[in-house]
């Protein structure tokens, strides 16, 4: 029983951490149809900004906010300079954002060097959930992830802004006629996606090695989480996709070698994509 | 296994050129303007005058950049000392540094370039076993030496020419030197039930195999053995398994960013209070990456640590501080440093810069100026007899200066004999 | 645009007249190709040592770029998994030489590489294309393919030698009457040169053939092509299979030439490099991809030693520019200059 509970906790936290990392990607993909391959570099950038702040004596929560805003601004600049010219060509944006990844990763190396960095755990200690232990910080990140997902859902489905944004996805021309400022909307969405990446990067920084290439760790996993989860189903899709990719790896690893677990999960993701190209919760 | 070179007769060449250039171009060949013969053996080095040239291959970019700086700096520092003392045989030293980009295929390419284009006299470096293996066929074919600095899995004939190769010298420790001398201490202090976690490749598997063998002889046991594919971000399920395993010691041979991610998550899950951690990978640079709170009280074992207090190391630390204040020096950097000095002595002894001369002089050489103590290059299998240290990370350490305290040490460990077909390894 | 030149990738040209055919033969693209291959042919006459050793490997990278060019420039499918096929071919030859042996092992190994490349690509291709998985989704699947290849090559050490890699000797290829040993650099150079030339001609033939034109029409508008009765999934699958097969054979030749194979050869990093080469070289012309592959490899080798940080940065910037604003790439732009000037005048 103890074991079941602890595996369950692993599945939940793995899923929520992956969802946190993937949310920015999901927002951008779901709303403006851009597969942002630069997402990994944005995560790394968020982690580095947070690291710099903490090392200057700024408290960690503030550092996370600074990272969120800073990466949001970088995303905004990238949108204005490059991405906005290519919304009509989703495929080009994918490749260009890969270029963004290459460039930003190299810039990080130039600015911060290549030494491994680390941030102290802001909330050391553990708490016990019905007999199964969990790190305080992991618990907090998981809760933040859940809160962010809820907030995103509320914004999209319960506010005026959300209605406009969704109207724009459904029918851009119609939205334009109804007075939605589409270019500005696109820009905001992209910047919000970048800010979410920065936020996630800063939040996971204490649990991971901070290095220029840290985004590659998540590249394939978070893409699959978003796409397998479902097109247009931003919140539910991300959650389901993260559960499939993150949670299933945990479950498979119980019975088999780690390498087998990872391979099988990727293969399952490909099969899911084949039979439900719009994703599990997606709609055309 | 090296094939005879050449293998290239005129008829075969014609066939090739006909295939390649087409009939139009063939006449120019027949008229006698044949390609210049490409030399397979590589350049002859710098000859017997002019500077002594060494090619150093270091991971200066890519996944293992963090180790690259100490790696190349160690060699460069020794060479600067040699040059300041007037060189060797009256000749100055020149180092050509090449970046491996942490990709073995780049190592193959760069080893070739250094030997053929830069005409180096021998090679030093490469970082991972894969990089060493990529360089080995090249040095074998060109009959140059490779001085390899990293802790490694030991030698076994099936991995020839990467190991068991008369052209390769090992300056780092292998598991019987790095792990065995400290097993009794760990069992006595913390218990004999080990949970082994390693990256999914040869070095961790060999290290664990040898550790397990010795551990069982000493009455301990392995309660878990897991191999993690590279670039695994989350360790939730593994942490759970370890938590339930009843292990005393978590024995780590994870590498790269995985070791950092694992140890940070291990600490964040509050597991440090229940288990003792012993890693055989995380030298000063990787431990810096994991950070003080997640490493506090953990054990590491190597042949060298920045904080060991030998007279040689005190001098060495000062030199590093003045020449490379930004570099985190570690076992591989020191091995590179020793390799350069020992090669210089070998050249003095041989009286010439040649592969055979350096090889026979290096074999059996003892170097008492090594920062970690005294090092002997064993003649029969080119493995180094080295000191071995077990250290524990101090609470709240701030830099490599106060990172580790030595808890167990052995002045000199003979490595296990290499599992090679033809010992001793010699050029003949 | 100039419709007489018979080498435009969009296959829109009118049926060529005799003069048109001649001009087609003398098109800028063909002239550049001839210059490139003649230059490559004569390299060993002027240079010795390292360039003769390393250029064949870069030519094979060029072939890898060709395989992506067929998919991307002509079929409109970007694969982030070409390195996987390259590595699979390399391992296929290595394993055959190790476990089979004998004088015919090299041919067997090359055949196995070809077979594995074709079959794997065909299976994956059909599986995806028959369900109309395309564009970004296809990119993700190929990304997963190279990730899985690298992970498996690392962990299946019984077969592949794992992370520490596998040694592959230089083979001797029996050609009936003569045996060509690749042990000498010069022989290896010309055998790989010949292979590169053959691959280039093969891809140009595909471009010229009816198949190539259908492929381009699918890229332009897949739904229209389907409406016209073409089995677009089949066409795309065949293109992917050809591309996978050629990439695998190139990988096998790379293995024997370099002497060493390790899992990073099949990884995401190397796969994405191929995309960068093709984008910068020019994805609408095979010669652009080939020059991109060879040229950037040469530049990487020389510049990485001197300005490692800035070179990678520059490559990234060039990639963004090439993909976004300069789609013809460097070679494509040069090729289309005369036509543009003419049409401006007209």
Image: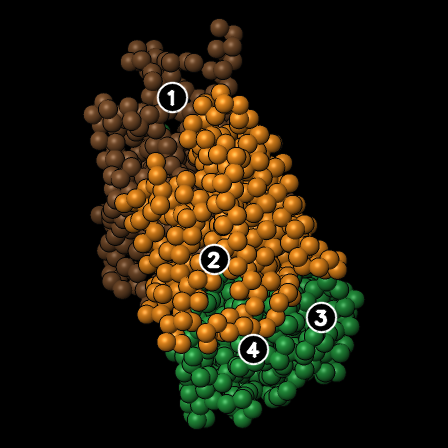
Chain colours: A orange, B green, C brown
| Label ID, residue B272 | 4
Q: Residue B102: x, y in percent?
A: 53, 58
Please name which of the two marks, 2 or 4, marks the residue nearer to the observer: 2
Residue B179 sits above or below residue C112 on the image: below
Near-viewer residue (B255 or B28): B255
| Label ID, residue A16 | 2
Q: Which residue position holds label 1?
A: C8
User: Distance of mark 4 from mark 1, alpha carbons?
Assistant: 66 Å
Q: Is residue B372 left or right of residue C255?
A: right
Subunit under mark 1: C
User: Distance of mark 2 from mark 1, alpha carbons?
Assistant: 50 Å
Please name which of the two marks, 4 or 1, marks the residue nearer to the observer: 4
Q: Quadrant of the N terminus of chain C?
A: top left
Taking the spot 26% from the left edge, 39% from the top edge, the residue there is C131
Q: Residue C51: x, y in percent?
A: 50, 46
| Residue B43 visible in the picture | no
């Amino acid at each position: 029983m103890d074991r079941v509970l602890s595996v369950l906790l692993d599945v939940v936290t793995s899923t929520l951490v992956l969802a946190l990392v993937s949310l920015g990607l999901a927002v951008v993909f779901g709303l403006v149809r851009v597969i942002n391959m630069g997402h990994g570099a944005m995560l790394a950038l968020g982690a580095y900004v947070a690291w710099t702040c903490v090392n200057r004596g700024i408290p960690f929560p503030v550092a996370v906010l600074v990272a969120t805003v800073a990466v949001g601004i970088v995303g905004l600049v990238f949108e204005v300079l490059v991405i906005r010219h290519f919304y009509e060509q989703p495929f080009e944006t994918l490749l260009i954002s890969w270029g963004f990844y290459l460039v930003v990763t190299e810039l990080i190396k130039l600015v911060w060097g290549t030494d491994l960095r680390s941030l102290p755990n802001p909330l050391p200690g553990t708490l016990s959930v019905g007999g199964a232990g969990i790190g305080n910080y992991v618990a907090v990140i998981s809760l933040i992830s859940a809160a962010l997902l809820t907030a995103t859902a509320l914004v999209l489905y319960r506010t005026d802004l959300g209605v406009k944004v969704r109207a724009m996805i459904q029918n851009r021309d119609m939205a334009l006629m109804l007075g939605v400022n589409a270019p500005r909307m696109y820009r905001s969405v992209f910047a919000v996606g970048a800010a979410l990446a920065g936020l996630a990067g800063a939040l996971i920084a204490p649990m991971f090695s901070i290095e220029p290439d840290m985004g590659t760790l998540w590249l394939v996993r978070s893409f699959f989480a978003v796409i397998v989860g479902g097109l247009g189903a931003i919140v539910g899709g991300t959650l389901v996709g993260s559960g499939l990719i993150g949670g299933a790896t945990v479950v498979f690893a119980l019975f088999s070698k780690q390498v087998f677990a990872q391979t099988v999960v990727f293969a399952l993701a490909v099969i899911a994509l084949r039979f439900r190209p719009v994703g599990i919760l997606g709609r055309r | 296994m090296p094939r005879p070179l050449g293998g290239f007769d005129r008829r075969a060449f014609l066939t090739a050129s006909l295939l390649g250039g087409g009939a139009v171009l063939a006449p120019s060949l027949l008229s006698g303007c044949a390609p210049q013969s490409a030399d397979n053996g590589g350049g002859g080095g710098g000859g017997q005058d002019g500077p002594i040239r060494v090619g150093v291959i270091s991971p200066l970019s890519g996944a293992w950049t963090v180790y690259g700086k100490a790696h190349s700096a160690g060699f460069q520092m020794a060479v600067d000392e040699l040059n300041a003392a007037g060189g060797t045989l009256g000749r100055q030293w020149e180092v050509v540094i090449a970046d491996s980009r942490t990709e073995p295929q780049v190592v193959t390419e760069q080893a070739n370039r250094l030997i053929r284009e830069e005409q180096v006299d021998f090679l030093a470096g490469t970082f991972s076993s894969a990089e060493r293996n990529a360089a080995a066929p090249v040095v074998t074919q060109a009959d140059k030496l490779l001085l390899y600095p990293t802790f490694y899995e030991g030698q076994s004939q099936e991995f020839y020419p990467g190991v068991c190769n008369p052209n390769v010298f090992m300056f780092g420790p292998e598991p019987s030197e790095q792990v065995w001398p400290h097993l009794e201490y760990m069992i006595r202090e913390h218990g004999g039930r080990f949970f082994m976690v390693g990256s999914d490749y040869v070095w961790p598997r060999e290290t664990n195999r040898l550790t397990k063998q010795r551990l069982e002889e000493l009455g301990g046991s392995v309660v878990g053995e897991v191999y993690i594919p590279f670039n695994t971000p989350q360790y939730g399920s593994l942490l759970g398994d370890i938590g339930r395993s009843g292990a005393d010691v978590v024995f780590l041979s994870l590498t790269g960013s995985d070791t950092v991610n694992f140890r940070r998550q291990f600490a964040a899950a509050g597991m440090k209070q229940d288990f003792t951690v012993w890693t055989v990978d995380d030298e000063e640079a990787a431990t810096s990456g994991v950070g003080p709170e997640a490493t506090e009280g953990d054990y590491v074992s190597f042949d060298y640590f920045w904080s060991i207090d030998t007279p040689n190391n005190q001098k060495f630390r000062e030199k590093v501080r003045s020449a490379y204040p930004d570099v985190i020096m570690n076992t591989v950097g020191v091995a590179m440093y020793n390799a350069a000095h020992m090669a210089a002595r070998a050249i003095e002894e041989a009286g010439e810069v040649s592969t055979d001369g350096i090889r026979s002089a290096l074999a059996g050489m003892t170097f008492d100026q090594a920062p970690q103590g005294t090092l002997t290059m064993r003649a029969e299998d080119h493995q180094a007899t080295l000191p071995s240290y077990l250290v524990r990370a101090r609470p709240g350490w701030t830099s490599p200066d106060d990172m580790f305290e030595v808890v167990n040490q052995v002045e000199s460990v003979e490595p296990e004999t290499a599992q090679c077909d033809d010992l001793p390894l010699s050029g003949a | 645009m100039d419709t007489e030149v018979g080498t435009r990738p969009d296959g829109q040209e009118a049926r060529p007249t005799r003069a048109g055919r001649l001009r087609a033969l003398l098109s800028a693209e063909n002239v550049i190709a001839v210059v490139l291959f003649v230059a490559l042919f004569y390299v060993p006459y002027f240079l010795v040592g390292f360039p003769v050793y390393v250029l064949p490997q870069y030519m094979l990278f060029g072939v890898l770029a060709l395989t992506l060019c067929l998919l991307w420039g002509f079929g409109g499918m970007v694969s982030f998994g070409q390195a996987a096929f390259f590595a699979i071919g390399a391992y296929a030859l290595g394993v055959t030489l190790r476990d089979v042996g004998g004088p015919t092992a090299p041919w067997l190994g090359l055949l196995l590489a070809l077979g594995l490349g074709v079959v794997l690509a065909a299976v994956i291709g059909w599986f995806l294309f028959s369900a109309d998985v395309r564009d970004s989704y296809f990119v993700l699947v190929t990304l997963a393919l190279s990730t899985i290849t690298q992970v498996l090559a690392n962990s299946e050490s019984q077969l592949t030698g794992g992370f520490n890699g596998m040694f592959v000797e230089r083979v001797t290829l029996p050609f009936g009457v003569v045996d060509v040993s690749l042990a000498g650099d010069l022989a290896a150079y010309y055998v790989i040169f010949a292979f590169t030339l053959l691959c280039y001609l093969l891809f140009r033939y595909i471009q010229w053939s009816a198949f190539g034109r259908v492929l381009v029409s699918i890229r332009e508008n897949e739904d229209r092509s389907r409406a016209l009765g073409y089995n677009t999934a089949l066409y795309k699958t065949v293109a992917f299979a050809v591309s996978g097969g050629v990439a695998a054979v190139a990988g096998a030749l790379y293995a024997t030439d370099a002497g060493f194979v390790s899992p990073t050869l099949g990884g995401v990093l190397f796969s994405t490099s191929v995309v960068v080469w093709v984008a910068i070289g020019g994805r609408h012309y095979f010669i652009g991809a080939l020059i991109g592959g060879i040229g950037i490899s040469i530049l990487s080798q020389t510049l990485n030693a001197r300005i490692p940080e800035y070179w990678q940065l520059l490559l990234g910037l060039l990639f963004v520019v090439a993909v976004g604003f300069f789609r013809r790439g460097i070679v494509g732009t040069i090729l289309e200059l005369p036509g543009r000037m003419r049409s401006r005048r007209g």
